[in-house]
Image (cartoon, grey):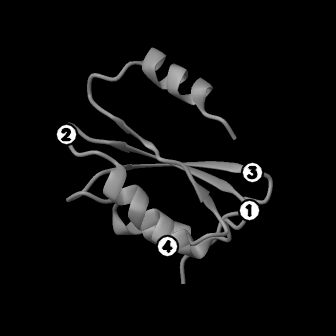
Amino acid sequence: MAETSDLSGYDVIFVGFPVWWGREPSIIDTFLESNDLTGKTVIPFCTSGITGVEKAVAHIRGILGSGVTVEDGRRLGADGSEEEIRTWTELLKF
């Protein structure tokens, strides 16, 4: 069994990962499955040159179920800037 983290002090969890063949690596699934995220908001983001985050977000929603809010997420390419990330996070509503 995977080790769990104490996430009780957090309402919003950012989950970042590289996209592998259109989805998140299995270790991300293990993290999500091993922690009770009920009532929390999960914001996925990925690093990728081309592939979007949409398939990964759909898979994450399936893993977590209806008790967790999973935002649409964001793909961050190699050309992304700190300003782009700052603007994105400031626009998030939760």
Q: Is 13 situated above or below 34? A: above
Q: Tell me residue 81's x, y (percent).
A: 38, 18
- Marks 1 and 4: in contact by CB < 8 Å? no
> What kind of residue is marked 2?
Ile
Q: Is residue 90 visible?
A: yes
Q: Is 92 situated above or below 57? A: above
Q: Tell me residue 19's x, y (percent).
A: 29, 52
Give the CA distance from mark 2 to mark 1. Answer: 32 Å
Q: Tell me residue 84's x, y (percent).
A: 44, 20
Q: Nearer the viewer, mark 3 or mark 2?
A: 2
Q: Is residue 3 visible?
A: no
Answer left or right for 31 relative to 40: left
Give the CA distance from mark 4 to mark 3. Answer: 19 Å
Give the CA distance from mark 3 to mark 2. Answer: 31 Å
For mark 1, what is the residue? Answer: 39
Closer to the chain start, of discs 1 and 3, is: 3
**Local SS, label 3:** loop
Give the CA distance from mark 1 to mark 3. Answer: 10 Å
**What is the number of the mark on residue 10?**
3
Q: Is 33 situated above or below 10? A: below
The image quadrant of residue 1 is bottom right
For mark 2, what is the residue? Answer: 50
**What is the number of the mark on residue 63?**
4
- Marks 3 and 1: in contact by CB < 8 Å? no
- Marks 1 and 2: in contact by CB < 8 Å? no
Within 10 Å of disc 2 (Cα), the crowding (few <14, some 14-19, many 20+) is: few
